[in-house]
Image (cartoon, grey):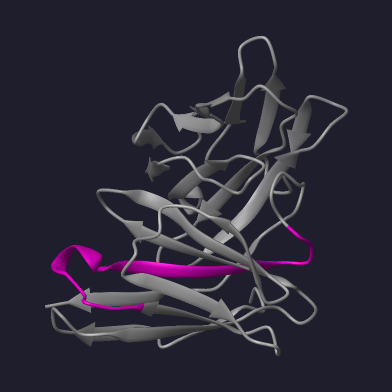
């Protein structure tokens, strides 16, 4: 069965600190992987996606994720977070099934 | 604004009742997806329709049903409601067929259902 697993339900960090949100996948076929973000009281928005080609993908607001086939991972990283990054982040698989989500809380 | 419209934004009802949630996809999108989000279950995929036909089914209960109409709007019907059905229900749309593809989903802002 194909699935994604988000290893951390909550990640609290201080402003300007680096952060990594972990996502592992399980699949025997080609994968497309996505990260979505849900800000408070809003629907989900696409943050970035991996389809093929370069294993490092970036978003416009400084997040990046690296597709690692050997480790079956697609972790999301940002070198310096802002208060405004506080949100829930979801990793999703190519059949649009989502992980359980990671709540990122950035503290001043 | 994602272009996906969900109504109503909030719905309060009693156990045993039936409700209908409505979704209008982005202009031109043929696929509609329904998700249920709750604290204990996270974001659960319920069902997907493409151009009026059911395309994929997830963790949707038999008490729940959905359909997509010729104008591409979709409705999610929830019946014999239980306390545990209280959740945020999201609709999303995409341009293509979905299912193993590289499509981006556009989400509505959700319908908050409270079953008392």
**Left or right relative to A75: residue A52:** right
Q: Quadrant of residue A93?
A: top right
Q: Which residues are magenta?
A: B78-97
Residue B44 appears in the figure: yes
Residue B99, position as x, y percentages in the image: 69, 50
> Does B91 lie within the magenta span?
yes
Q: Quadrant of residue A12?
A: top left
Q: Residue at x 79, y 62 (%)?
A: B96
Q: Point out residue A41 in the picture as x, y percentages from the top left corner.
A: 40, 68
Specify whether residue A14 is painted magenta: no
Q: Nearer the viewer, residue B80 or B100?
A: B80
Vertical relation: A56 (above or below) B63: above
Residue beneath the point at 77% across and 47% down: B102
Residue located at (68% from left, 83% from top): B72
- Residue placed farthest to the top in the image? A70
Q: Which of the image's four quarters has the C terminus of chain B?
A: bottom left
Residue A17 versus residue A43 in the image, above or below: above
- Nearer-the-camera pick, B64 or A13: B64
Taking the image as shown, residue B37 lies to the left or right of residue B15, namely right
- Closer to us: B41 or B58: B58
Q: Of residues A28 and A78, which is closer to you in this image?
A: A28
Picture layout, residue A96 above or below residue B79: above
């Amino acid at each position: 069965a194909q699935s994604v697993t988000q290893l951390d339900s909550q990640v609290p960090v201080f402003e300007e600190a680096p952060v990594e949100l972990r996502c592992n996948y399980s699949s025997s076929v080609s994968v497309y992987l996505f990260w979505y973000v849900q800000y408070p009281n809003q629907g989900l928005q696409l943050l970035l996606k991996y389809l093929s080609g370069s294993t490092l993908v970036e978003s416009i607001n400084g997040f990046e994720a690296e597709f690692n086939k050997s480790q079956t991972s697609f972790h999301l990283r940002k070198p310096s977070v802002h208060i405004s990054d506080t949100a829930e982040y979801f990793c999703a698989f190519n059949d649009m099934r989502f992980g359980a989500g990671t709540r990122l809380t950035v503290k001043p | 604004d994602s272009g996906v419209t969900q109504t109503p934004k909030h719905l309060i009802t009693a156990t045993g009742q039936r409700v209908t949630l409505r979704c209008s996809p982005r202009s031109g999108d043929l696929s509609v997806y329904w998700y249920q989000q709750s604290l204990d279950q996270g974001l659960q995929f319920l069902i997907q329709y493409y151009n009026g036909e059911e395309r994929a089914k997830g963790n949707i209960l038999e008490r729940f049903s959905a359909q997509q109409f010729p104008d591409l709007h979709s409705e999610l019907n929830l019946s014999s409601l239980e306390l545990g059905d209280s959740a945020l229900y999201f609709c999303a749309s995409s341009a293509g067929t979905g299912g193993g593809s590289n499509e981006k989903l556009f989400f509505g802002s959700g319908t908050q259902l409270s079953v008392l």
